[in-house]
Image (cartoon, rainbow, N blue to C red):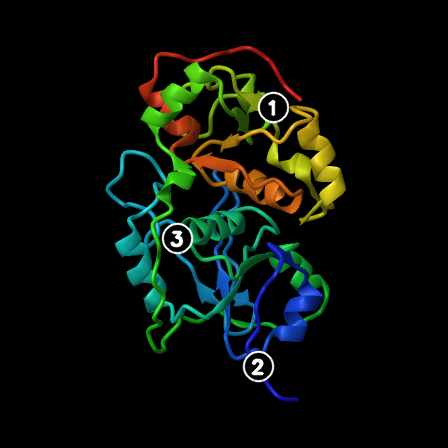
């Protein structure tokens, strides 16, 4: 069989699709796993999908000296670190994480913010890949050629604190919070020490787990029906969460459902709850 380059036309791909295209000449598989902020399980996975490269959200693709976790890096830093992973302008990227769907959509969104769209999330992630019985290898550090990837500045797709202050006042967009209902309503404390409970004023709650089923996304019709409970029109969405990770699950769900006018609040509740005196404790929820 002749190997060839591929172009990805969907924001998610199945494990069967990845197995079929695993040897495409321009395929890059990224492991974008980070620990769950609410998890106490510290066991580490030792295996990976063949030839996967670790996309280090925490140490390479977030500002380490930022006040808040997971703050997006500059175009220059993102470009440099992506090149170190051997990513090219014509690469076709599939990103997965070890929880199924957790941090991989953050990687997808970051590349989209960099003007790169030949990327998809592995639906079902590593658990579904293993369950299918597909091949595995021991984790290894990528050592290879540098790529020629070049990020383009679309950082406006991440909202900052000042912009969110205006959004709360103007009500031009629907602010949707991906945290659990109990965190959104303050029934349980935030998992980050010292962070108060609450919610951004005028925000609504859609726990990210509501768009998932058995490690994978629900289908487009089901997801659109969920979003239409907030609005029948095609509004502008701003997705938020604890620190900008699971908000990207809702962003990817919106993309799957056919919405294209959305952004992510990068600092999310960690930033808002720390800096703003304007918070809400209402229990508005889907």
Viewer-nearest residue: 262 or 78:
262
Residue at left 57%, top 81%? Answer: 4
Disc 2 designates what residue? Answer: 4
Callout 1: SS? helix
Labels 3 and 2: the sequence-earlier one: 2
Q: Which residue is mark 1?
A: 181
Q: Secondary structure at mark 2?
A: loop
Q: Is residue 2 left or right of residue 131?
A: left
Horizontal and vertical percent for residue 30?
A: 49, 63
* Distance from the alpha carbon under mark 2 to that under mark 1: 46 Å
Q: Residue at x 36, y 66 (%)?
A: 149
- Secondary structure state at the residue bearing disc 3: loop
Rendered residue at 35%/54% (across/down): 152
Q: Residue furthest front?
A: 233
Q: Kindly tell me whether residue 103 is visible in this rendering.
A: yes
Residue 274 falls in image quadrant: top left
Which numbered disc flags the more N-terminal residue, 1 or 3? 3
Quarter placement of the N terminus: bottom right
Q: Which is closer to the viewer, label 1 or label 3?
A: 3
Instruction: Identify whether 271 is placed above or below 212.
Output: above
């Amino acid at each position: 069989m002749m190997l060839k380059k591929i172009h990805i036309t969907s924001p998610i791909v199945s494990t069967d699709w990845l197995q079929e295209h695993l040897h495409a000449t321009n395929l890059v598989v990224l492991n974008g796993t980070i620990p769950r902020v609410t998890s106490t399980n510290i066991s580490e996975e030792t295996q990976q999908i063949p030839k996967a490269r670790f996309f280090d959200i925490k140490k390479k693709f977030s500002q380490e000296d930022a006040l808040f976790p997971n703050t997006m890096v500059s175009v220059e830093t993102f470009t440099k670190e992506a090149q170190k992973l051997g990513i090219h302008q014509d690469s076709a990227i599939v990103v997965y994480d070890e929880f199924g769907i957790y941090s991989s959509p953050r990687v997808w969104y970051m590349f989209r913010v960099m003007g790169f769209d030949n990327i998809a999330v592995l639906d079902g992630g590593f658990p579904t890949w293993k369950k299918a019985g597909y091949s595995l290898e021991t984790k290894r550090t990528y050592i290879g050629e540098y790529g020629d990837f070049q990020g383009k500045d679309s950082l406006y797709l991440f909202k900052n604190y000042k912009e969110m202050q205006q959004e709360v006042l103007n009500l031009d967009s629907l602010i949707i919070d991906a945290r659990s209902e109990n965190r959104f309503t303050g029934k349980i404390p935030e998992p980050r020490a010292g962070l108060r409970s609450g919610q951004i004023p005028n925000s609504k709650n859609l726990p990210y787990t509501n768009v998932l089923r058995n490690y994978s996304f629900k289908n487009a019709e089901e997801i659109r029906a969920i979003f239409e409970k907030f609005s029948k029109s095609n509004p502008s969405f701003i997705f938020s969460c604890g620190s900008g990770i699971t908000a990207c699950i809702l962003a990817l769900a919106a993309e799957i459902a056919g919405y294209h006018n959305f952004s992510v609040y990068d600092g999310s509740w960690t930033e808002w709850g720390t800096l703003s005196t304007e918070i809400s404790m209402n229990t508005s929820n889907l």
